[in-house]
Image (spheres, rainbow, N blue to C red):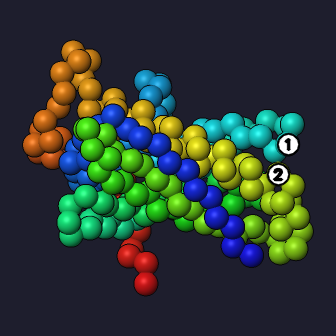
Amino acid sequence: MERHVYTSTLASVPFADVDAILRDAPVRLFRQRAADNTDPPQTREIQLHAGPIAIHDRFTIELGEFEAHPDGHFSRLHLRCHSDRHHVVLPDVEVALDASDAGDDRTELEIAAHYTPPLGALGALEDAVVGHRAVEEAMTHLMADLRTALEAVHAPADGTAVPTSTIESTAPVVDGDQRLPAAS
């Protein structure tokens, strides 16, 4: 039984800048903010709730294929998220991160995710009781982190906007920016 999760938000960043980052340097969006962090860039510490119980977990995000729509107003980055500790509560999740031009120098970000609860009928029961809400919460956290990272990249410390050409030309080459093969 495949389950689906959707979430969206608006980022105060022009679509051209978001498109350039998703295409050229998406790993920049997944860096942990702590200076002493030694985890790989695509690893996230997260606190989820399974009913009244808080569960501390870490999930890893693998970068997948980037797709750009020919009209230049829509793009998609495929991601795969998997839990490093609690696979029953947070199963592997396939994510399509969509970005589209919302006008007024804003970009609409949408996550359309799907997953299959593990453990057959027992997993489906766990998913119905607490698991689906935990996956929704994880995707909501991911969306908030992405929006914050995009807005931080777009607005440097001095408050001036970064032109799209600067973002495109200074995209760093980062070790570990491995992408998944295209889905068939």
Instruction: Report the disc number at residue 16.
Output: none
Pick whichever, 130 or 25, lies toward us: 130
Quarter of the view holding residue 5:
bottom right
Q: Mark yes or no: residue 179 visible.
A: no
Pick whichever, 96 or 65, lies toward us: 96
Tag 1 secondary structure: loop
Pick whichever, 152 or 178, lies toward us: 152
Q: Is residue 87 above or below residue 170?
A: below
Question: Residue 87, position in %: x, y?
Answer: 73, 58
Which image quarter is the C terminus in? Answer: bottom left
Q: Is residue 94 left or right of residue 158?
A: right
Residue at 21% across / 48% down in the picture? 16
* Mark 1–mark 2 distance (CA, rounded to whole Å): 6 Å
- Residue behind mark 1: 51
- Residue behind mark 2: 130
Q: Is residue 29 above or below residue 114?
A: above
Given the current orientation, which residue lies at the most extreme front position?
103
Q: Earlier in the sequence, mark 1 or mark 2?
A: 1
Residue at 36% across / 54% down in the picture? 99
Quarter of the view holding residue 44:
top right
- Mark 1 Cα shell of 10 Å, populated few (<14), some (14-19), many (≥20): few
Question: Residue 69, position in %: x, y?
Answer: 26, 67
Report the amino acid beneath label 2: Val
Tag 2 secondary structure: helix
